[in-house]
Amino acid sequence: MSVQTPPTLMKLARQALLRNEALAISALEKLPWTLFPALFKDAFHGRHTRIVKAMVAAWPFPCLPVGTLMKTPNLETFQAVLDGVDMQLTREFHPGSLRTCLETLSIQNCDLSQSDLNYFPWSHSLRQLKHLDLRDITLCTSCLKPLGVLLENVAGTLESLDLQGCSIKDSQVPDFIPALSRCSQLTRVNFWDNDFSMPTLKDLLHHTANWTKMSVEQYPAPMQCYFGLGYISERRFAQLCLELMDTLRPLRQPKRILFSTDPCHECGERCVFDFGPRLCPCWQ
């Protein structure tokens, strides 16, 4: 017969707050900042949207990483998070709370529906983003125009963009290329693990003339590098990456640019072109 560990006093206190919505919201002003993460996690998973909204507005930390909480996304809870960020512009619950637009938005390892994506451009608090991290997001939509609108809104402030592992297809890239070309403050971009063909990569690079502050840029190897079952052609990989470099050089001189294959089926390592091919151990 197993003996269950009794809940801690802190857990009981969090449960009591979540049972009394008005008390929880009114207590945020005096709540120690160390208690915010656990209470926020409980409120998020319990879909207490009013408490989630109020907690985001009072968030005492410079970064709000909600991606790991969104294994089972819920649109109402997600909108509550963004509504709470908007409230930071007009409400001040806590001396560590953000009082300006959000600088970093990190959402990882979850699904984003069309409704979720449509909500981004309407959030006033996202108008001065510096860092947008959507790594390993499954975009459950064929239309990425809302992402293009968001990039247009933050073209003057965005410094880093991470779209690795979003399974973006050729047909979706034109939805955001025009806006991306205007993001002149970018210093880092990451497009690894997306399904781009050689023509799409060339088109993308042709739109990067304004990226004069870029320090590191990461692109997927073109799909033409692969043959059956996802294995790469070493010769094609080196040849096509050199061709992409030749496409870029008349526009600007990149500081560091990396083209990467998918992880190898045998060893799990990548083949990376970093001003020259660096092959996985299987090719050594």
Image: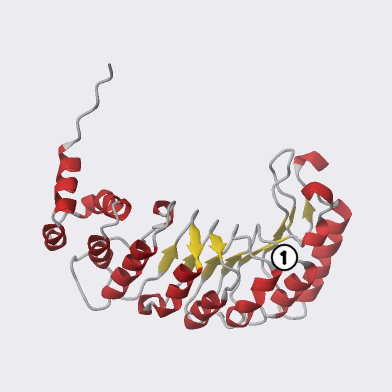
Residue located at (24% from left, 62% from top): 55
Rendering quarter of residue 251: bottom right
Residue placed most toward the observer, 147 or 192? 147
Above or below — where is 199 with respect to 231? below
Residue under the point 37% across and 64% down? 78
Left or right, residue 275 beside residue 167: right
In this rendered view, identify the residue nearer to me: 233 or 211.
233
Residue 231 lies, in percent from the top left, at 80, 48
Identity, as a three-letter code, of the amino acid under mark 1: Phe
State left or right for residue 213 relative to residue 154. right
* Camera-nearest residue between 75 and 191: 75
Q: Which residue is mark 1?
A: 196
**What kind of element bears circle 1?**
loop
Q: Identify whether 212 is placed above or below 170.
A: below
Side of 53 relative to 78 (left or right):
left
Residue at image position (32%, 51%) is 45
